[in-house]
Amino acid sequence: MTVSKAKKSETLAELKADLTRAKSFALVQSNRITVAEVSKVRRGLLPVSGKMIVAKKTLIQIAAKEIKGVDIPEDMLPGQVAILMAFDDAVAPLSVVNTLAKEFEGADKLVFTGSYLDGSLQDAQTTKKLASLPSRDVLLAKFMGSLLSPVSSLARFFDGAKQKMTETNKSTVGDLASAA
């Protein structure tokens, strides 16, 4: 399908504007994906501040070179390619696309071919691993839970000691220890 020069320059301007705001981006091979599935992906990306654009490979390469200063090799751009941009959380949009890709019928409709994160290009395997990580919020919640676990155990211990003191009419914990 030929694209007019005006459409190409419009797409390039959009890519540059979005890449300027993006914290990271990923390249996704999008073979045999339907319009409905693309719409589902785009709707799924809205809550996590992500965006997916299907564009010509050369336009993606030009925009990435001019905005991020990175040369995207040809092997990261096989077949029909879309660029997935993350504006807030650098990994959350990848997780959304990874989850949706598993839902779509037929294998290999959305396949990560690479990504750009923290100033460097990542290969397809690293990108897939990043996409399978839980979101930042989930990781922070798990971290806080592990930090609070010793504190809550100590609180349960003191509550149990207080309960035992009340039951046995003891006035200090030392009295409980001597009674045992």
Image: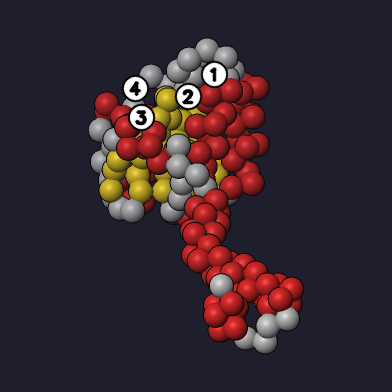
Asked if labels 1 and 2 touch by Cβ distance under 8 angstroms, the answer is yes
SS type, badge 3: strand
**Which residue carries the number 3 mark?**
113
Rounded to the nearest angstrom, the CA distance separating label 4 from label 1 is: 15 Å
> Mark 4 or mark 2: which comes first in sequence?
4
In front of the other: 163 or 16: 163
- Where is the C terminus found, in terms of image quarters? bottom right
Which badge, 1 or 3, comes first in the chain's sequence? Answer: 1
Amino acid of disc 2: Leu
- Relative to the observer, which residue lies in front, 26 or 56? 26
Can you identify the residue that label 2 sits on?
A: 110
Q: Which residue is mark 1?
A: 33
Gap between marks 1 and 3, in whole Å? 16 Å
User: Quick check: 163 left or right of 138?
Assistant: right
- SS state under label 4: loop
Residue type, label 1:
Ile
Above or below: residue 101 compared with residue 133 = above
Q: Which residue is mark 4?
A: 78
Q: CA distance from mark 4 to mark 3?
A: 8 Å
Q: Label for residue 57?
A: none
Rounded to the nearest angstrom, the CA distance separating label 2 from label 1 is: 8 Å
